[in-house]
């Protein structure tokens, strides 16, 4: 695909930024299980926290290809930092698309500028992909709701200022913007996770938290079918590109390592089996990027296939990232099992890509249905 000058410019700028400001800190972020305030400030200054949001409110309003390329470069450097860009933009984008005029005026300028962080609070201890099983309840009281329940695995919930919370109100799903400082809301860090260890996840407990009706996004009944699904669609798009970044990172690491590491009088790259793995990695990146480009182009034109093609891209890229990262560890041998090289982190982060924004198994169910429809949508 031929990039426009604007798209190439965003890619090159993100590549430099990621290499200079994020990659040197990636192992520290992983080890300390936190993204430093300096990285958050740098992301804010570069405009990446509002990259997908409307220019009218101060966002970058990047076209899908540009946004994807930026996400790929940041994902290559550090999946934890990429996940901040993902979750903030996906929740804020739902607010921009489905919030009313007053909600947009109140929150979007702060979110576009990155002065406030918003987290996506859907998952619960007993409800992940089965969204209809969420147990959080919203009871109507006067001009608002009393919300009770527990959310878990909330990405960057440890530092979020706002939460886009999903609950059931008399069996009808609702989406509510809840302020971190609301009475009855408790945030507890979730630590020692397997991958994306710097994504600062949290458990968010709500005990009769009073939420004004003016904080409800979309009508009652639209919380899952419209608000959550719109946000998750953006999240899958971002994870697909981020997974592609992991693949590129693994390929770069293996090209560098096998070109230096000697075995007897030969470098590793001179062995046929090693070259086969490198070829597979190159093909995996090319294929993952291709399905991501296809998804981006369909999104740009408003094509009705875009949602499912985005899910396809996420499934393919995440699965490929896991496979490539596993091979990358093996190519590094014992060194691949240490923190001296990035491939172990890539493998752990890639594994998470197969779970977030819909597991592999959920995607297999929905994409199989799409396989029967696809011939009629070409």
Image (cartoon, grey):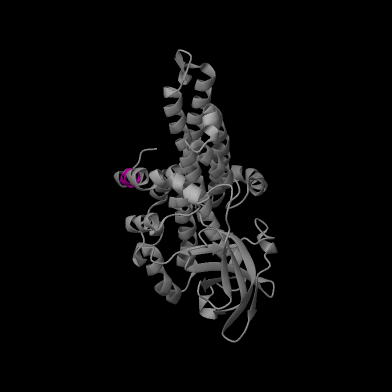
Residue at 48% x, 14% y: name it.
Answer: 264
- Name the outermost residue toward the bottom: 142
Of 19 and 334, which appears nearest the observer? 334
Looking at the image, residue 187 lies above or below residue 52: below
- Name the outermost residue toward the top: 265
In percent of width and height, residue 100 lies at 47, 74
In percent of width and height, residue 319 lies at 58, 39
Quadrant of the snapshot with the N terminus: top left
Quadrant of the snapshot with the C terminus: top right
Taking the image as shown, residue 126 lies to the left or right of residue 10, namely: right
The number of discs equals 0
In percent of width and height, residue 226 lies at 57, 64
In which quarter of the view is residue 112 placed? bottom left
Report the predominant secondary structure element of the magenta stretch: helix
Let me know if residue 5 is in the magenta part. no
Looking at the image, residue 177 lies above or below residue 316: below
Residue at 61% x, 49% y: name it.
Answer: 355
In percent of width and height, residue 10 lies at 33, 47
Residue 294 seen in the figure: no
In which quarter of the view is residue 186 placed? bottom right
Of 332 and 5, which appears nearest the observer? 332
Of 11 and 341, which appears nearest the observer? 341
Of 273 and 34, which appears nearest the observer? 34
Taking the image as shown, residue 144 lies to the left or right of residue 134, namely: left
Residue 169 seen in the figure: yes
Residue bounds of the magenta highlight: 9-13
């Amino acid at each position: 695909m031929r990039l426009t000058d604007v798209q190439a410019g965003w890619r090159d700028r993100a590549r430099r930024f990621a290499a200079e400001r994020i990659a040197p800190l990636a192992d520290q972020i992983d080890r300390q299980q936190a993204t430093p305030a300096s990285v958050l400030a740098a992301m804010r200054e570069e405009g990446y926290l509002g990259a997908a949001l409307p220019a009218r409110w101060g966002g970058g309003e990047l076209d899908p290809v540009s946004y994807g390329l930026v996400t790929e470069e940041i994902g290559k450097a550090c999946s934890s930092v990429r996940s901040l860009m993902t979750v903030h933009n996906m929740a804020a984008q739902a607010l921009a698309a489905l919030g009313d005029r007053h909600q947009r005026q109140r929150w979007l300028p702060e979110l576009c500028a990155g002065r406030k962080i918003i987290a996506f609070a859907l998952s619960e201890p007993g409800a992940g992909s089965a969204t209809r099983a969420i147990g959080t309840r919203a009871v109507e009281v006067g001009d608002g709701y009393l919300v009770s329940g527990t959310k878990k695995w909330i990405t960057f919930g440890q530092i979020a200022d706002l939460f886009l919370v999903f609950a059931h109100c008399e069996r009808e799903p609702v989406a509510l913007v809840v302020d971190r400082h609301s009475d009855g809301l408790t945030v507890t860090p979730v630590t020692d996770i397997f991958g994306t260890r710097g994504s600062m996840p949290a458990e968010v407990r709500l005990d009769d938290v009073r939420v004004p009706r003016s904080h409800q996004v979309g009508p009652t009944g639209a919380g899952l079918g419209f608000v959550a699904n719109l946000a998750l669609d953006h999240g899958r798009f971002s994870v697909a590109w981020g997974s592609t970044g992991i693949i590129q990172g693994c390929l770069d690491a293996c090209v560098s390592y096998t070109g230096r590491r000697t075995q007897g009088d030969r470098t590793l790259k001179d062995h046929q089996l090693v070259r086969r793995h490198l070829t597979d990695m190159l093909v995996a990146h090319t294929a993952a990027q291709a399905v991501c480009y296809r998804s981006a182009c369909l999104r740009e034109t408003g094509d009705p296939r875009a949602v499912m093609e985005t899910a396809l891209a996420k499934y393919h890229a995440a699965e490929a990232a896991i496979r490539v990262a596993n091979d990358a560890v093996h190519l590094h041998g014992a060194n691949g099992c240490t923190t001296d090289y990035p491939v172990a982190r890539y493998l752990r982060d890639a594994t998470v890509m197969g779970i977030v924004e819909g597991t592999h198994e959920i995607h297999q169910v929905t994409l199989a249905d799409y396989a029967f429809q696809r011939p009629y949508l070409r």
